[in-house]
Image (cartoon, rainbow, N blue to C red):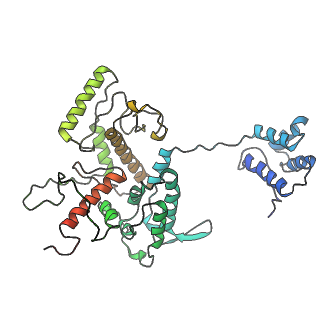
Amino acid sequence: MTDNNTKLFKGDNVGENATDFLNSIRRRFLISPTYSEEEKIEYFELSLKDGSYASLWFSKLKAADKKTFKDLTLAFRSQWPAKEMAEKSRGELQEELLDLALDPEVVGVRVEEDGIQEWGHVRWARKVAELGARVDKDGALITQVLKNIPDSLLLQLGPKRDTWAELVQAMKDIPTANMGSLPLQQTPTRGLAAAFSGMTASSPARARDPTRRMLFPAAGAAVKPAQRYRPDPERLQMIRAAAVAIHPRTPAGQAAYAQQITAYTQAHGAGRPSEDRPYPLTPGTVAVGSGECHQCGQIGHFADKCNVAAERRVPDIELRWRQIVQSIISRIGRAQREATAVNIVADASDDADGDVFGPYPSAEYDQLVIEEYLAQGKGRGPSA
């Protein structure tokens, strides 16, 4: 199909793109390569709207600027340079990915986009896969992304969803006949649902560290009270109320920081940070939740653009603490944007094996629960 109807260009930047206009002219000449230089320039002039700024600009051009179409192109690009896209950082794209929640109202419902109908949950999977492939080719964030879908749908996913392509296919493979009757609410146990959905009773148990506290202790053993689930706003309020003092990057500040680390280790051992046990922050850094780089604790860039020397970066446990707080803030923002009354909570436990951020800690926690469940005979039928 030939490009016979080039849209007239006005040059006022209202509802038009100068680069697209110039490209339409160039396509025309590629389709009809017999145009002479004079004809190319005349065609260009006739494609400018009469009485417009672009037409006035052309009339004032020097003869040297329209001697050939190449000269004219250079003059045009000088007047209307190509627009540069404000490219998003990897951190921004990752945040956008984790914000893509699946609307329960479109699960099992045909939706139309660009004239093509598809199931709403499949379209969601395709969108997260396209975005995920840009920031997470290995699929490490899939576990986090699956927290944004209803539990009932999560339980129907097959076990093969370790890559973005497999996630899309798993969504396509879900039968849609009975989706209308599925309960689509979110529940605080969605972390367990994610783990059980890809497991059978015959799954082999993973080797466990015998020093870990059993989640299902023997009869008579002391049981640590379970930590209640807290809404994210409450967690954030606790974090801000118990803010740890940040010392300056001076010898005295370093000494005070060392005392903070010692106190934390004595009180919590290797326990991961939480709102109940905020982690000390490296001297000279900014407070958690400040929009800071999680690797160096400074403002002005994200972790994917961090060029700070390795020795100036924060410890791994502090990095994770900063990620935890940012994750809480992000979920609060998403909940506010969605204008719902649902409290979004994290999968967390109060022992050292629990965590509130990242696919690895939550997956490890879920797996431990499953193993203990199967070890008690619950997954194999009645126990002896």
Q: Which residue lies furthest to the left in this view?
A: 220
Q: Is residue 373 above or below residue 328?
A: below
Task: Tell me which corner region of the image, top left, top right, bottom left or bottom right, holds residue 344.
Answer: bottom left
> In this picture, is 255 found above or below 35?
above
Q: In this view, does 165 lie above or below 91?
A: below
**Residue 118 placement (x, y as % from top left):** 54, 70
Q: Residue at (81%, 59%) from the top-left corner?
A: 3
Position in image of residue 17 (x %, y %): 72, 48
Can residue 45 be seen here?
yes
Residue 192: name its quadrant: bottom left
Q: Nearer the viewer, residue 96 or 141?
A: 141
Tell me the quarter of the image containing the C terminus. bottom left
The location of residue 36, given as percent across then percent down, is 92, 49
State the image coordinates of residue 108 (x, y, percent, origin top left).
Answer: 46, 72
The residue located at (86%, 57%) in the rendering is 32
On the question of residue 61 being in view, the answer is no
Query: Where the N terminus falls, by quadrant?
Result: bottom right
**In the image, is residue 144 above or below residue 294?**
below
Q: Is residue 244 left or right of residue 83?
A: left
Q: Is residue 239 left or right of residue 210?
A: right
Number of marks: 0
Q: Nearer the viewer, residue 68 or 43?
A: 68
